Amino acid sequence: MQGPDVYNVLRGKYIHKLYHANTVTTSCTFLKLGCLASRGHVTDLGLPQTSQYTDSIDRKYGIWYDVFADTVDIHHRAGRFKFNQYGPVLFVLDVAILKDLPAKSEVLVTKKNPTKWIVDETVDDRFFTTSEELESYLEVGTFDQMVVIRTEKGILPFPGGTVPIILDDPQRTLSDGTSAFLHATTRIRTAALGNTRIQLTKRICRGNCRCIELYKTFRDFDKFFQ
């Protein structure tokens, strides 16, 4: 599908934003580049990014150079049970970005998370491939249904204007004793300076969110926030 095709379906479902979560280190690389970038693109450039448990899967199934986004804020919706497992930094983009993708770009939506794919599946098993199918079966808030953006360079340039970013405040220190939130804030602002205009805000959780409790025992905490 082309970007405008997916855009029209998403707007018809009252989806106005796309969300991409990542670690502080990877997000800083994005801000310096001025785009969301695929795992493959950042690797090819030799730039810093945090390893993800899905890296081997992305390579295996040929999605290493794709950019992924969600149609909902996973932390906001699932905070009673988990924080976003991809990272505490959330980029918020207007869905209209799909209308202005680089030439030769393609946009698909997964039917299930790639961690659930099996080798013998077809493209049609893994993705909604037509706007008609997407309109019929897209369910807002279903985490398995992710927007997959394929561009020639494996990047999604930030649109003009200011990029909103929401940062989790885990109310915990890093292993060296520094505040994780303050450390992350400084790194993000420094990376953006002269590269990407941002509006950085601290996440305001729902009353039933348990992220603070969950962050207290999270083993990869430094990996997320350093």
Image (spheres, rainbow, N blue to C red):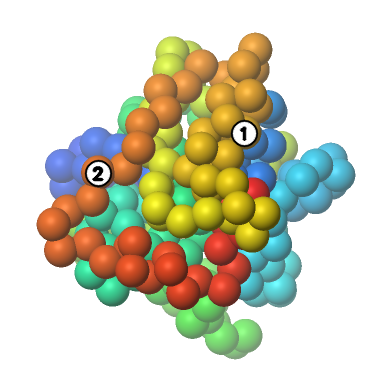
Residue 134 visible: no
Residue 97 lies, in percent from the top left, at: 42, 29
Residue beneath the point at 43% across and 65% down: 215
Element type at mark 1: helix
Left or right of 67 on screen, residue 206 = left
Residue found 27% across the figure and 66% down from its top: 210
Q: Are marks 2 and 1 in contact (CB under 8 Å)?
A: no
**Location of residue 160 in the rendering, given as x and y in whole percent from the top left corner:** 47, 14
Q: Say few, some or many: other residues with alpha carbon within 10 Å of mark 2 (under 14 / 14 to 19 / 20 or more).
A: few
The residue that label 1 is drawn on is 187
Residue found 71% across the figure and 73% down from its top: 56
Q: In the rendering, at what x and y percent does residue 46 appear?
A: 86, 44
Q: Is residue 6 above or below residue 97?
A: below
Q: Where is residue 177 drawn, in percent x and y?
A: 60, 53
Q: Residue at x 52, y 46 (%)?
A: 179
Tell me the residue that label 2 is attached to.
Answer: 204
Find numbered disc 2 in the image and state the secondary structure of the residue it sits on: loop
